[in-house]
Image (spheres, rainbow, N blue to C red):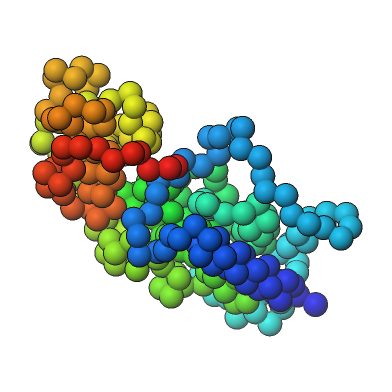
Amino acid sequence: SGINAEYWKQLYQRRVREAVVSTQSTGLGFGEEPSLLVEQQNPTQKPVKRRSSGKKRAPPKITAQQLPVEKAKKRSTKPHAEVVICTSACHREDQGMVRSVATALGGIIKGQVDKSVTHIVVGTVRRTVNVMRGIVLGCHIVTLDWVTESVSNGGWASTDKFTLTSEFPSLHQSSAKRRSLSAKLFRGMGSLYLDPSCQPPPKELSELVTLCGGKVTGSRNRGKYCVGGSESDSVSEQWVLDSITSIHLQPTRPYLAVRSPSPEY
């Protein structure tokens, strides 16, 4: 009777355990600088195979009719703002769960963050391109717990308890304030030249710089700052990413001189 909330709870708990094991095995922790991940752009990477005692079963679909009656009655009849969700660094099963819950509760799923997206649901905490866009555009950036809580509520839960403020302190600021501050982050500081070797690639990095009020030039000689590359006057891509993450323009000096290997992403 009603949504199989226990199924989703157990699935998510299993994902948390897997994430902990993965973190311990790689020696990385949330306290370290998260890597930038461009999602779904490595067609050669094969999905991890999992053991199965029988045929693979797809997660059960959740429909609006399956919402608990007592929960549905408690939901307000006042109109709510449209919920548009994008996922970041989520397992396929978790993506299917988010999609099913969104269908049942009247939300919309998008594959890439744009100005219409209101919420980004994060599986593994990483500084992905979608998360970076979400910081700039004022999206709510939340854990999968927000989705399971919404299942229990029979309606979209508040994001307060599930926002990733520890990992991304700028999320303490309101969505409107983040949009306002981000829009003028690189404004008036001259053009940036993005070296072809940039990671993330120049196309994604250029989009982020432009969203933050900056200008990008295709000529190295015309650029006030050269981002990426091995020249002594270049600044690391991390300068751009750290400035966006904190929504505060970082000094360039710590990002000059000898470059360390590009982060895996």
* Residue at x 55% of width, y 43% of height: 111
240 versus 11 height, above or below? above
Give the answer, above or below, for where 164 lies relative to 243.
below
Q: Residue furthest right?
A: 54
Q: Report the quarter where the N terminus lies.
A: bottom right
Can residue 96 be seen here? yes
- Find residue 40 and report its image quarter: top right
Q: Position of residue 172 (x, y in %)?
A: 29, 67
Q: Residue at x 24, y 37 (%)?
A: 259
Q: Quarter-wise, where is residue 150 in the image?
A: bottom right
Provide residue 156's location: percent of width, then percent of height: 54, 68
Position of 220 compared to 78: left or right? left
* Up/down of 107 relative to 154, above or below: above
Residue 221 at what x, y percent from top left? 14, 17
Q: Which corner quadrant holds the C terminus?
A: top left
125 on left or right of 232:
right
Q: Residue at image x 49%, y 57%?
A: 26
- Asked whether, in this view, residue 107 is left or right of residue 183, the answer is right
